[in-house]
């Protein structure tokens, strides 16, 4: 394993996380912010000019089976090695970029295609103060986000 090396399937993951939408980039980011908040995330970073939006939410990561297993191992082999997950922070990152020309659209022009990528990851802390990182590449996460975004845009009268 090489630090910083992308996974072998990076291109496929990136494509699964990306949708092409019609509209104004600032409007799409504003609606994505609302969807993020509706999903329980707190916005931690936002830069419409850079096309970046990030949010986090914290959740309990304790699993009874993991704790029970750690206790059994501690009884058998000593309490110094007992370890279990305690909490997790889930991060959602949205990036956008206009496809095609970098020239701003004149007022009243037809909307351009904007690529929007949504990625998820989590940081999991344990009872010993250690933290590990996991990418969350489950397609249902992106699907839920983009479905809610489509509903939000439709309610606003914007094209998806």
Image (tube, rainbow, N blue to C red):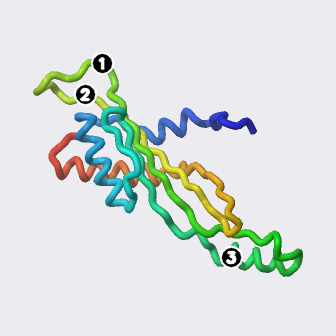
Query: Residue 132, image x and y in percent?
Result: 65, 55
Residue closest to the eye, 117 or 143: 117
Q: CA distance from mark 2 to mark 3?
A: 51 Å
Residue closest to the eye, 98 or 46: 46
Q: Which residue is mark 3?
A: 65
Q: Which tag, 2 or 1, sits closer to the chain's start?
A: 1
Q: Which tag, 2 or 3, sits closer to the chain's start?
A: 3
Q: CA distance from mark 3 to mark 1?
A: 54 Å
How many other residues sit within 10 Å of disc 3, few (<14), some (14-19) or many (≥20)? few
Residue closest to the eye, 78 or 13: 78
Q: Which residue is mark 1?
A: 101
* 34 sits left or right of 63 in the view: left
Position above or below: 131 against 137: below
In which quarter of the view is residue 53 placed? top left
How many other residues sit within 10 Å of disc 1, few (<14), some (14-19) or many (≥20)? few
Position above or below: 30 against 34: above
How many other residues sit within 10 Å of disc 2, few (<14), some (14-19) or many (≥20)? some
Name the element at disc 1.
Answer: loop
Q: Which residue is mark 2?
A: 112
Residue furthest to the left: 108
Name the element at disc 2.
Answer: loop
Query: Residue 78, image x and y in percent?
Result: 87, 76
Q: Which tag, 3 or 1, sits closer to the chain's start?
A: 3
Q: Is the Cβ of the residue at disc 2 closer than 8 Å to that at disc 1? A: yes
Quarter holding the N terminus is: top right
Residue at the spot 35% in from the left edge and 48% down from the top edge: 146
Name the element at disc 3.
Answer: helix
């Amino acid at each position: 394993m090489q630090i910083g090396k992308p996974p072998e399937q990076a291109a496929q993951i990136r494509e699964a996380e990306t949708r092409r939408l019609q509209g104004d980039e600032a409007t799409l980011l504003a609606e994505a912010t609302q969807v993020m908040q509706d999903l329980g995330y707190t916005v931690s970073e936002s830069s419409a000019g850079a096309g970046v939006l990030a949010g986090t939410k914290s959740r309990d990561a304790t699993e009874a089976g993991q704790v029970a297993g750690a206790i059994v191992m501690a009884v058998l082999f000593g309490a110094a090695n007992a370890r279990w997950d305690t909490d997790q922070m889930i991060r959602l990152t949205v990036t956008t970029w206009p496809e095609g020309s970098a020239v701003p659209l004149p007022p009243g022009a037809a909307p351009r295609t904007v690529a929007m990528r949504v990625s998820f990851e989590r940081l999991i802390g344990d009872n010993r103060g250690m933290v590990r990182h996991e990418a969350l590449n489950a397609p249902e996460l992106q699907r839920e986000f983009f479905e809610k975004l489509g509903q939000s845009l439709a309610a606003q009268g914007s094209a998806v």
